[in-house]
Amino acid sequence: KEQDRKKLRVVFDFDRWQRHRSSSRYLRHMTGLFTSRTLKWMGAPLVCTLSVATAVGIYYTAAEMGMVPDIPDIKTNAVFGLTSFALANLLVLTTNTAYQRFDEARKMWGLIVNRSRDMTRQGLAYIPEDQPELQEMFCRWVVAYSRSLMCHLRAGENLERELLGKLPESELRALLTATHRPNFTNQVIAQILKRADLPGAEVKPWDSTANVKASAFVRMDEHLTVFADVTGGCERILRTPVPLMYSRHTSRMLTIWLSFLPFSLWDACHWWTVPVTGLVAYLLLGIKEIGLTVEEPFSILPLEKICDTIESNVWELHSTHSAQGAAASRR
Amino acid sequence: KEQDRKKLRVVFDFDRWQRHRSSSRYLRHMTGLFTSRTLKWMGAPLVCTLSVATAVGIYYTAAEMGMVPDIPDIKTNAVFGLTSFALANLLVLTTNTAYQRFDEARKMWGLIVNRSRDMTRQGLAYIPEDQPELQEMFCRWVVAYSRSLMCHLRAGENLERELLGKLPESELRALLTATHRPNFTNQVIAQILKRADLPGAEVKPWDSTANVKASAFVRMDEHLTVFADVTGGCERILRTPVPLMYSRHTSRMLTIWLSFLPFSLWDACHWWTVPVTGLVAYLLLGIKEIGLTVEEPFSILPLEKICDTIESNVWELHSTHSAQGAAASRR
Amino acid sequence: KEQDRKKLRVVFDFDRWQRHRSSSRYLRHMTGLFTSRTLKWMGAPLVCTLSVATAVGIYYTAAEMGMVPDIPDIKTNAVFGLTSFALANLLVLTTNTAYQRFDEARKMWGLIVNRSRDMTRQGLAYIPEDQPELQEMFCRWVVAYSRSLMCHLRAGENLERELLGKLPESELRALLTATHRPNFTNQVIAQILKRADLPGAEVKPWDSTANVKASAFVRMDEHLTVFADVTGGCERILRTPVPLMYSRHTSRMLTIWLSFLPFSLWDACHWWTVPVTGLVAYLLLGIKEIGLTVEEPFSILPLEKICDTIESNVWELHSTHSAQGAAASRR
Amino acid sequence: KEQDRKKLRVVFDFDRWQRHRSSSRYLRHMTGLFTSRTLKWMGAPLVCTLSVATAVGIYYTAAEMGMVPDIPDIKTNAVFGLTSFALANLLVLTTNTAYQRFDEARKMWGLIVNRSRDMTRQGLAYIPEDQPELQEMFCRWVVAYSRSLMCHLRAGENLERELLGKLPESELRALLTATHRPNFTNQVIAQILKRADLPGAEVKPWDSTANVKASAFVRMDEHLTVFADVTGGCERILRTPVPLMYSRHTSRMLTIWLSFLPFSLWDACHWWTVPVTGLVAYLLLGIKEIGLTVEEPFSILPLEKICDTIESNVWELHSTHSAQGAAASRR
Amino acid sequence: KEQDRKKLRVVFDFDRWQRHRSSSRYLRHMTGLFTSRTLKWMGAPLVCTLSVATAVGIYYTAAEMGMVPDIPDIKTNAVFGLTSFALANLLVLTTNTAYQRFDEARKMWGLIVNRSRDMTRQGLAYIPEDQPELQEMFCRWVVAYSRSLMCHLRAGENLERELLGKLPESELRALLTATHRPNFTNQVIAQILKRADLPGAEVKPWDSTANVKASAFVRMDEHLTVFADVTGGCERILRTPVPLMYSRHTSRMLTIWLSFLPFSLWDACHWWTVPVTGLVAYLLLGIKEIGLTVEEPFSILPLEKICDTIESNVWELHSTHSAQGAAASRR
């Protein structure tokens, strides 16, 4: 099940959107029904519900044949009608909170993309041109930040493998020995910025760009605060689930509701009770199951793709910058 | 279908609002019912639903005539009542998430309009007056940014055709060879700002406007960060759909629900079952269809109109500025 | 109808709130039912619905009298129950999006009030005291901004009449010839700030307030960005309706739903079908009608009152400032 | 009724929360049912509804006894079912918008608390130590701001009584003669800041804290902008109700719905119709009544308690500061 | 009950998420049903509801045996259907507002984590290296802030025990004597920053990093404003419950609704009425109970774990910084 979650990491492009919108999707979705992950994941409770329904059917049939005492006839339809709004309330909460968490996590990772780009643009502009190795180190650690955070938020990732060949051996060792690696990355970037500023310490008083430099420094520091906020925000989502009482109350109500459903349906549906109960269970348990899947969004978001995007963006900015620098020095 | 989406790109003015609000809209909408795009787009699943309903009708009629075995009579009305809240939950999610994405995309493009104006105003004020060609280049690349982003977000747009005659040949070539064009545009604007600042490098120490200049630079840099955030935000909407599990679960439930509906209706409606099923399917499939249409908002937002607005605003600010400059020099 | 919208522009005070909360409101609202604007505006579709209901009644009566063939008896109650959640979904969307747009527009105009005040406070403090005519011009154009935006957002307003006597003839002409007047106002304010700063250009290096001045300039520039954002935000609301497909789908479903309602009611209500259909139509069409009314909020918000507030606030700040200046110079 | 609203101004502490959560609350709430304010406030419409129900009962009884013609038997149950979703829609809107307004107002007042503290902390740090009387004046006017705003937002408050002994006679007079008192308070604070800065005007060029001072000034100016935004935001809530059309449509539908309810219930409940109608009316009218109560939040929020908190916080910060100053000078 | 709340303070890790998502949760939740806290906490009202149901059952049975007069047969099913949407409205409000408060509180504490880290990073960088004891004092008080706020927001916490050994005796005494301890902590941090800046007062005019230092000071001051906002925001949540009228109206309606439910069920369910009423009560009272539990979030959030995280993060940053400083001085 945990492995299957990886298959949910999709990135859409124009073609996928077109396919997503095409009328053929109903056919596609229906044919994929029995192999769908949702069905697979909720197999156990679904089988239980069907067993209960079958048992109820057998008892009623036996009672009709006089083999067992009659079940007193209770018309519980009204009860199901009266409680469905409360169940709806709980399922809406499940759906909404899960989606909000997914959306918030995705937005925070989008922010990492944006700010990595912006920070690289600024860093390349303000780290003095005579320190190309510092510029490169800066780019390299901006890339390392997103990889560190990804490995921090997911079980079973290996930061060493992710960064092999992307950071020099010594830097990688230092990073791997840190307790809180995204924080460590942030500290390294801050130190690079501090070191980069040193050569500018003896500028002449009439250098009007000193103010600009100070401001650029502040703006990059602000981006570091954004990184710190995103790190903390992702940890918050990972450490704090939706209050468990809601989750438990929903589970219990769903179980009770579905267990008593066959009693309510037998009179109207007889042996059709079993498939009908199965369908209702599939719908309701499915909503809960998807909610649970989406509640912890980091293992279903395509973070590795986002990290790749950041990496290629950063190095493209670096190469464009280097090319311009070379052109400028030739002039 | 993809071509039809272009017709959804509307821009309202006072007259359209008045027509939108007029009582005659009900008539207008009803007469347009059978030629509407929504109906056209959901033709296939609608025909399927009607076929199922017809097949059910034929079987029931045949059974009544004794030609085929009876379908056991199951009263599924209760089941439909019991599951409608769950279907409502899923449709509400579809509608809300789709509208939120549409709204967010529109707001981000609104931000591009606002900040393009504001940035042009500031750029014209702080790029030294003795560099008119730099001022013009600045305006031209602010315009290029919105066009680049539009082509980045839509399939089938041609950035070369969009910017032909708006950028000089050499600049256009450079832009077209870049991998990530909106990012490249941002980099060019940042370079213009950096180049513009150079002449101010030797201001005298008593020039109190040096601080103002540094601040103006910072503020324009902040606008570039906004551009980077909008670029990333639009990409996020384009790359990440609402979790597909929700979409699939909704499709499946709708299909199952509508397939079993004729069984539930036959007793009450007989052959009227077919049109009634059609109407219910039209309503429910329509909500899902519109949700899917709006989920990817860039191909239905009038981005080309927004780009035109930006272009005319930027050049109007430029011409007002030039006129004032000419007036000032005459004095 | 468009004229009537003006009457919706209310401003509450303590007395109106007390009346709004008093128990007598039910009586007041009921007696005003038949003269209410909502009823008037939705007269046409309401009459149509009643006509359909009457026609259905006549046919059924004729059928009972054997004059026309019987309508096959279909029990559509279930269908109405099954589709009501979908109609609810669409009406909730109508209501929520309309209210959100109204609320957003009101908040943006509230922001204009706040920032006009704040900007005037700062402008009076930082435009040198020896340029009283520049201070006055500044106040005058802050006032002109809100009026220009109001006329920009509403059909049938006359900016010339609004600003006659508030701007000198020449300035008014210049404003009226501009294509985008709120933008022009912003440009003028920016120029005043720029001109105001000039005398300070030769401050001595030990003037510690130079930094404060630069900051004050930046903060006023930020307020101009807020103005640009509000201008753009209001235009966005004016130019972009809620996706029309939703509006059309809702109209169509409402029409179909209400047209078939009499068939469903006849058995239970006979000739009472007509008033009952009328009541249901009144309720449902009313919600849609109010949604449409509120969707374009600028013609129903009391913008002229808000502009008056801004004007009196700005001039009160100016007169307090002048009085203090006079007092200070006397000392 | 307006007096009763004052009793809704509660401030919770640990004990109140414990009582709020205790199981005994059901008993407490039920015993307080008949003395509850909600019931009292909606007495008139409740009595009306009960009268209608009684009249319907009398007529039906008379009809059964043959004294008056029969009311044609119409089964309106379906109609009530069909319209309940629309009524739900309107009641949800009432509840949500009212609560949002309450929450927004509370958050804005929370912001006043936070920023009053923060501003006092900064003001005490940056107003020169040799001007203790200016520091005290600063604290006094920060306290005056919240009191002025409270009296501005509530009918029947007396600013003079509130500030007697807290502002010197002359300052209090000046404040009371201002048209817009919260704005006047802001202007005074801005002037204090400006005056406080003057002694620093001749700092030496090597004073590296000049930048800090300028920044501190800017940050306090930002807090003044927050005060201006809160003032405007509270006025917005006070001046602009939720669009009245919604409120009226809800009132009308509730009245019609409750008036026809007895006809629908008589067959099933006979004379029990009266109490049952009463109960339904109590539930529905109650939701509307609470919504109206909360819609204008300033008279039910404990603003005087919040003002007291601000006052004690500001003076505690002042006395701590003074004690430290004394300790520092002794050293 | 208040002690039990502590057990709700959970922190999730990868294993807990996997268990949370596993199919076995339904079994786990059902077996824990009778020992669950929710059930325990709502024991009293549940027993009352069951007693009422039993009493109704006894009376009906007695009436059937002719011992007491018949209860007139009223078909209240319709009434329950008609009011369920209003009850749903109130329960949705309870659930949503409670969750929003929980979420807001958690986000504010997440902000404390992020900003404590960021502030420590900046503080260590800008407090001069020759004042290691000031750096340490700074770290110590950042840690003290979160502990002070936790004790401020929870009944029964002991700040002295929390900070014993973490602050020197004299500092701890000073903190404990303050009236508003989180505010006091903020004031101490501000003083440390002010004191730290003093040695830099005589920097040479060509020191281009003076601007950076001033900016760093401002940025740390901004973090103090965030701390002040969080302090105020948490106090707001603690002092202001959701308007009590909503809570009371919900309690009353639930009580009435559940008390009359047995009358409605007896005909259909006879003695099964008692367990069925119990189940419905469990579902509805449970939603309300969880809402009340979550409404005051500070006693169920794992604040002590968050404080531990902050403490370990701060000291890890400090030790990394010290190690680098030692390495630098060795070079």
Image (tube, coloured by chain):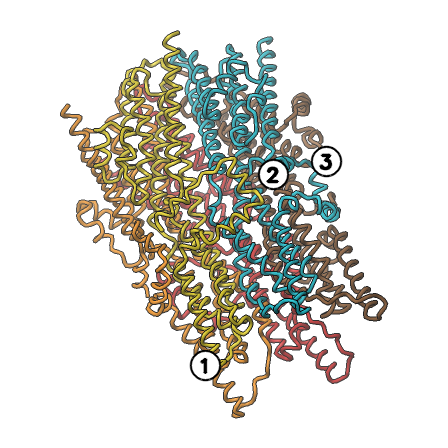
Chain colours: A cyan, B brown, C red, D orange, E yellow
Report the side of B305 relative to E253 (left or right).
right
What residue does disc 1 label? D54
Q: Chain of mark 3?
A: B
Q: Chain of mark 1?
A: D
State which chain disc 2 sits on: B
Query: At x 70% / y 35%, what residue is drawn?
Result: B157
| Vertical order, D34 against B28 (above or below) | below
Earlier-in-chain disc, 2 versus 3: 3
Q: Is C14 or D42 nearer to us in this picture?
A: D42
| Quarter of the image with the N terminus of chain C in it | bottom right
Question: In the picture shown, does residue D117 fall above or below A250?
Answer: above
Residue behind mark 3: B156
Q: Nearer the viewer, mark 3 or mark 1?
A: 1
> In the visual, does A203 lie left or right of D318?
right
Label 3 and label 1: CA atoms lie apart by 70 Å
Separation (CA) of disc 2 from disc 3: 18 Å
In the picture, measured across the screen, residue C100 lies left or right of residue D235, that is right
- The amino acid type, in three-letter code, at marker 1 is Thr
| Residue nearer the viewer, E125 or E307 | E307
How far separated are the C-alphas under marks 2 and 1? 59 Å
